[in-house]
């Protein structure tokens, strides 16, 4: 699985350093909150979990993890059917992203 | 174009606002983390275009479209490709952007929106007289892949039935996959009135009105308190 990176953020920002800083700041505050919501409902509420995984897909793609996006998309579909098989792989993704944004 | 952004995700709002800042013709007048706040804003302010997230908790983007009367042009923004099919059912939806939105795709979408807004403006300027002369007299509904023509003057009642509507006419009834909101926009205001959240009636077909109900053909239809004044206004009372 690809590693989180800033390629998409760089592409969006161009030379606009102000926007780059702002977007990274938002991700640093928004991503941990979204992950916390996922952790709260994991293995207990698959509907809520599917909704937050859906939301996290955007963050995954912003952090340039396009294969991770597919993992999340497959997992979201599983959750809609009440299955949790993809949790471990998805959790790995969350760990990677969490570590990456701490270092930003 | 005056625009607003509705998205529960701050990162998504920031990206759209940043992309908009690169287009001279766009002015972002407000951003909203939920659709309810946006509806309140639209009740008092005019905008040309809405960037609307579909997947929001409690009140989705489609709930927003169904609630706003005469919605502005809308560009949907979503992480879900599957909603594209639903999007085609709404005339107000100009385009559908899958997140993450990139600048080239965004610019294409804006071009579409500008074409829509300018064509609507020129149509309304030029053809208001023409519309008066040549009003639509009928509606086409899609039933089992057939487009069936229904004359407006034959319809006496339209009833909401979950994801469907039941259109009752002098000759027969039709069950169509649609909503009251959608058909209301297609009906001539001079003939039809929503008297209850589940019913639209043809006011020319009323037989009598008693307290909070109206008799239309053989159906007794409830009139909600909020719709009653408008109904009374439309009657030629002695």
Image (cartoon, coloured by chain):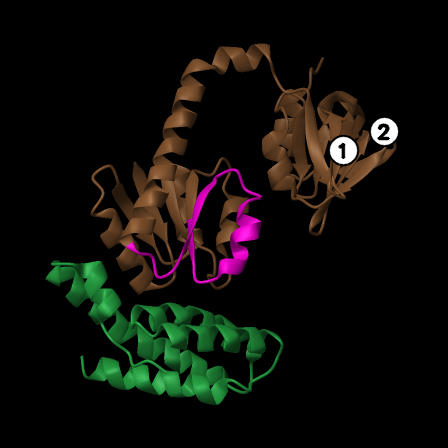
Chain colours: A green, B brown
Subunit bearing disc 2:
B
Left or right: B133 in relation to B198:
left
x%, y% of residue A64? 30, 72
- Nearest the viewer among B141 and B216 is B141
Q: Residue at x 27, y 58 (%)?
A: B15
Disc 2 designates what residue? B217
Q: Which residues are magenta?
A: B76-102
- Specify whether residue A4 is painted magenta: no
x%, y% of residue A96? 31, 85
Q: Is residue B91 above or below residue A99?
A: above
x%, y% of residue B200? 70, 35
Mark 2 and mark 1 in contact? Answer it, CB < 8 Å. yes
Q: At numbered mark 2, what does the secondary structure look like: helix, strand or loop?
A: loop
- Specify whether residue B81 is painted magenta: yes
Badge 1 density bin: few <14, some 14–19, many ≥20, Cα 10 Å:
many
Subunit bearing disc 1:
B
Which comes sooner in the sequence, label 2 or label 1? 1
């Amino acid at each position: 699985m690809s590693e989180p990176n800033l390629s998409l953020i760089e592409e969006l920002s161009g030379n606009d350093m102000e926007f780059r800083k702002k977007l990274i700041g938002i991700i640093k505050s928004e991503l941990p909150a979204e992950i916390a919501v996922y952790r709260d409902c994991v293995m207990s509420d698959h509907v809520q979990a599917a909704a937050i995984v859906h939301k996290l897909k955007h963050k995954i793609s912003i952090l340039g993890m396009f294969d991770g996006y597919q993992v999340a998309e497959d997992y979201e579909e599983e959750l809609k059917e009440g299955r949790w098989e993809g949790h471990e792989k998805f959790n790995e993704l969350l760990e990677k992203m969490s570590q990456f944004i701490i270092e930003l | 174009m005056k625009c607003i952004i509705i998205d529960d995700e701050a990162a998504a709002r920031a990206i759209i606002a940043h992309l908009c800042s690169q287009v001279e013709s766009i002015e972002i007048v407000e951003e909203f983390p939920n659709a309810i706040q946006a509806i309140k804003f639209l009740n008092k302010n005019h905008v040309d275009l809405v960037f609307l997230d579909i997947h929001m908790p409690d009140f989705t983007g489609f709930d927003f479209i169904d609630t706003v009367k005469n919605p502005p042009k809308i560009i949907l923004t979503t992480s879900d490709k599957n909603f594209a099919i639903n999007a085609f059912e709404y005339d107000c939806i100009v385009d559908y952007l899958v997140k993450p939105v990139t600048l080239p795709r965004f610019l294409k979408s804006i071009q579409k929106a500008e074409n829509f807004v300018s064509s609507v403006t020129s149509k309304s300027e030029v053809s208001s007289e023409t519309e008066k002369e040549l009003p639509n007299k009928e509606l086409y509904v899609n039933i089992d892949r057939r487009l069936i023509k229904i004359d407006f003057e034959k319809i006496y009642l339209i009833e909401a039935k979950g994801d469907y509507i039941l259109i009752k006419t002098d000759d027969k009834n039709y069950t169509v996959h649609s909503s009251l909101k959608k058909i209301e926009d297609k009906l001539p205001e001079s003939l039809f009135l929503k008297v209850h959240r589940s019913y639209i009636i043809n006011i020319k077909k009323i037989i009598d009105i008693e307290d909070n109900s109206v008799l239309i053909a053989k159906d007794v239809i409830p009139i909600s308190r909020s719709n009653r004044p408008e109904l009374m206004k439309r009657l030629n009372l002695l």
